[in-house]
Image (cartoon, rainbow, N blue to C red):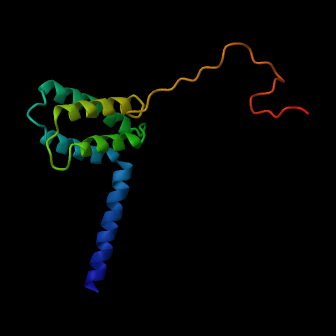
Amino acid sequence: MGCGILGVIVLICFIGFIVYVRSHPEAFTDFLMNRIEATFSSDVTDQDKADLRAAYAAYREKLRTKSVSSRSLDNVRVILMRGGGGSKIGRDQVHELTAAFREAAAGRDAGVPAVVITPPDGPFTQGTPGPLASPTP
């Protein structure tokens, strides 16, 4: 009976953690940034670090107000996984992370180009069949 109660307590704690992270995602990304900063390789310059911190600060503010897409964090995960587990974060990865945070803070997903759709030139005539209209017999 003691193990059953302990299991229920662990389950409640796990669910509470998930609810907290979903309502405060910046707590998870702060932890992630601390881990990133702890594993910089020697080729990462002070300017690279400052750029990453500034880009993350802008991203964090958007994340706090819930105005970024969830795919932006997936892009960060992909960049980190490309370096392999437990490895140092190199200068190239720092540049990629900085770009991903900047694009996410700007409201675009990393790697997804902005698309602008413009209407064709000329006025539209009412009653003109479109390309999918069936011909009249």
Looking at the picture, tell me which residue is in the foreground, 84 or 116: 84
Picture coordinates of residue 117, whole percent (x, y): 58, 23
Residue 30 seen in the current view: no
Picture coordinates of residue 109, whole percent (x, y): 41, 34
Give the answer, above or below, for where 32 lies relative to 135. Answer: below
**Residue at screen point 33% across, 29% down:** 102
Quarter of the picture holding the C terminus: top right
14 with respect to 34 (left or right):
right
Q: Name, please, the residue furthest toward the left.
A: 42
Residue 91's quadrant in the figure?
A: top left
Residue 90's quadrant in the figure?
A: top left
Quarter of the picture holding the N terminus: bottom left
Q: Name, please, the residue furthest toward the bottom.
A: 1
**Residue at screen point 18% across, 27% down:** 48
124 with respect to 28 (left or right):
right
Picture coordinates of residue 86, whole percent (x, y): 15, 49
Q: Name, please, the residue furthest toward the front.
A: 137
Counting every numbered tag in the picture gives 0
**Residue at screen point 30% across, 65% down:** 13
Residue 105 seen in the current view: yes
17 with respect to 40 (left or right):
right
Residue 78's quadrant in the figure?
A: top left
Q: Name, please, the residue furthest toward the top.
A: 122
**Residue at screen point 76% across, 28% down:** 130
Picture coordinates of residue 98, whole percent (x, y): 27, 31
